[in-house]
Image (spheres, helix red, strand yellow):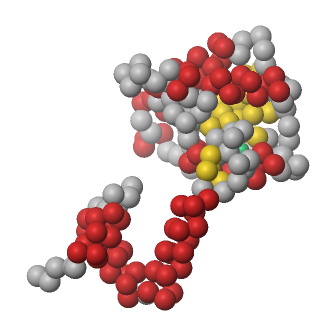
Amino acid sequence: MPQATKEIQTLIEMMAKLPGLGPRSARRAVLHMIKKRALLMAPLADALHTVAASARECLTCGNIGTADICDICQSAKRETGTICVVQDVADLWAMERAAAFKGRYHVLGGTLSALDAIGPDELRIPKLIQRIADENITEVILALNATIDGATTAHYIAEELEGVVTVTSLAQGVPIGGELDYLDEGTITAALKARKAF
Ligand SMILES: [Zn+2]
């Protein structure tokens, strides 16, 4: 079996470290890129170079952008007064794809975890508390993952903010188009607890 040269092998090994790609997918991706060198590989290399040089965390909310303050924090069209707290940037982007929230965000950068020795100061929790005062925030929406660590973090933040600001959280329950038979017990239990008048 023909082996890739050292340079190409290095590229394959780096690609294989990306989430969702293993060695086999990485080999296929690299071969595909080489075949489409002008159309795909050269522009991709340029884009990687540009983003590697310019990507940074927003100093206010923790979103990833290419300026010190992200587009959302800079936008005059976003409502002030409401902050949606998410665990990671991927969650913020998921919320934005849904386009249902018009306020601003705060990315924690993880969840509290006794096991991994991650306390409030390791997350962007002090900065959140500071923003609530600085930006006259009236509501904090907790949009954390429905995991044990996510729930622990949500409880901690809710306690810290008690009497300071209204704290709400995303409803949990049966997804749109979801069939009960396919849901796990945790989702069904959460949906039952969060039931509302018909
Ligand atoms: Zn921002």
Residue 188 visible in the picture: no
Where residue 131 sits: x, y (%)? Answer: 76, 28
Residue 170: x and y in percent read: 65, 32
Q: Is residue 67 left or right of residue 41?
A: right
Q: Give residue 174's quadrant in the image.
A: top right
For the residue pair 169 and 191, the one nearer the viewer reads as: 169
Quadrant for residue 144, please give it.
top right
* Extreme residue in the front direction: 53
Instruction: Give the quadrant of ligand 1.
Output: top right
Residue 94 x %, y %: 61, 50
Q: Nearer the viewer, residue 13 or 111?
A: 13
Please identify the quadrant where the C terminus is shown.
Answer: top right
Question: Going 71% across and 22% down the picture, which residue do you hit?
Answer: 129
Q: Is residue 140 above or below residue 17?
A: above
Q: Is residue 79 visible?
A: yes
Q: Image quadrant of residue 164?
A: top right
Q: Residue at x 34, y 76 (%)?
A: 30
Name the residue at 76% across, 40% down: 104
- Residue depicted at x 49% and y 82%: 42
Is the residue 54 above or below the residue 9 in the image? above
- Side of 70 relative to 88 (left or right): right
